Amino acid sequence: MIDVNDAGLAKRAELVIPGGTYGHMDVRSFSSTLPQYMASGEGCRITDVDGNTYLDFMCGWGPVVLGHRNRVVQRAVADQLALGDCLNGGSSVMVELAELLVDTVAHADWAMLAKNGTDATTACVTIARAATGRRKVLIANGAYHGAVPWCTPVAAGVVPEDRAYLDYFEYNALASVRAAAERAGDDLAAIIVCPFRHDVHRDQELADPVFAQGLRELCDRTGAVLILDDVRCGFRLDLAGSWEPLGVRPDLSAWSKAIANGYALAAITGTDALRSAAESIYTTGSFWFSAVSMAAAMATIRELRDTDALSRMRDCGQRLRDGLAAQARSHGLDVVQSGPVQMPLLRFAGDDDFELTRRWCDEAGARGVYLHPYHNWFLSSAHTAADIDEALDRIDGAFAAVARR
Ligand code: PMP
């Protein structure tokens, strides 16, 4: 069993970081066995500051799509680092990356680059309002689009005016979107939606194609902008865009996470109809033109495009799902697995407060498998069938421990 003491860092952090740590990576909020501080990563494994190694099924919460320290990406990063990162403007890699995004993403006629997913979703909303001259934006109840006042899930520090022109609908319920559009009337600027429902604390829910197509039709009819928030799913499911298999193309997409295999980058892509609105807004940041993460993105997207990385990730995800189902059955436990196999989630049936699932994740963590009880996991193309089997071997002990209780 793994022993974690965070090398004394948690105590030091309490003194100099409010709350010791914050946000989604505050491990205290979801685990009592996993470490807070990590030392290194390699492929599908991460090692904590005490020297314990874990099979990683969070992948930096999504960004690490090719595995930690992927050699091709690391080489591109080293080559760009040798030239410079933060120069007085974009470097040639910025234009090359925008060209690659326009070639890769089905709806994209142009691309803009930023740092975080929140930058991208916020810019999409701003572009939609600039384009339409309207104010109202429709959002699915419970959806996560970032951590600034218009979209943060936590109310502290947010005033009603920050959300004055937002209205809400139920994911996969077209009638509720139509009702919200009706309420917005001729002030409807945009609908922002994720490719599937991956809200925390609930089973994941794939998008009903009729729902996706209905949003497209509603936007076409009302002149509102359809924004796909592909921050979490993008470059893991379908390189052309996560709703491409449903035949639905958004007007704007927000990307981040997997775009550069862990280097800080986000992108906004859009159609020609929104090009002048994108030109008209003011959006930027001190590090938005940094070249290193763009070089990482070039290498990441090419690697995803030119190898079988996506299908291997899907196959390993399926192997994990099948293996977990068989193990749960053999221990007489009833589980619910949801979402695409590359972004899986498991919950014990009837475990509505996630207490049993949390205990199971704790047991897996103590056996060197990094899982999350109520946020979707992520696979990378560095996971092999042998890694999945090793993880399942360890997880079997977690099922046994939960079954004993
Ligand atoms: N949208 C979605 C769907 C996300 O999952 C996230 C990040 N979890 C964001 C937006 C915000 O991205 P970031 O944390 O990079 O600002």
Image (tube, rainbow, N blue to C red):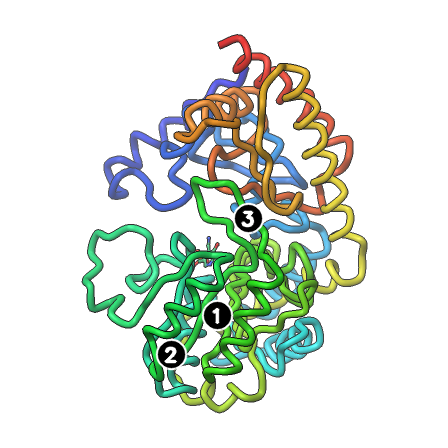
* 390 on left or right of 222: right
Mark 1 neighbour class, 10 Å CA radius: few under 14, some 14 to 19, many 20 or more: many
Question: Taking 108 as reference, is 17 above or below it?
Answer: above
Question: Helix, strand, or loop for circle 3?
Answer: loop
Q: Are marks 2 and 3 in contact (CB under 8 Å)?
A: no
Q: Quadrant of residue 190?
A: bottom left
Looking at marks 2 and 3 on the same chain, the residue that comes earlier in the sequence is marked by 2
- Where does the image place residue 324, in percent across and percent down from the top left? 66, 27
Measured from the top left, where is residue 288 in percent x and y? Answer: 47, 71
- Label ID, residue 313: none
Determine the residue positioned at 62% across, 83% down: 109
Give the residue pinned by disc 3.
Answer: 205
Residue 296, can we see it? no
Q: Residue at x 33, y 82 (%)?
A: 187
Q: Are marks 3 and 1 in contact (CB under 8 Å)?
A: no
Q: Which dot marks residue 188?
A: 2
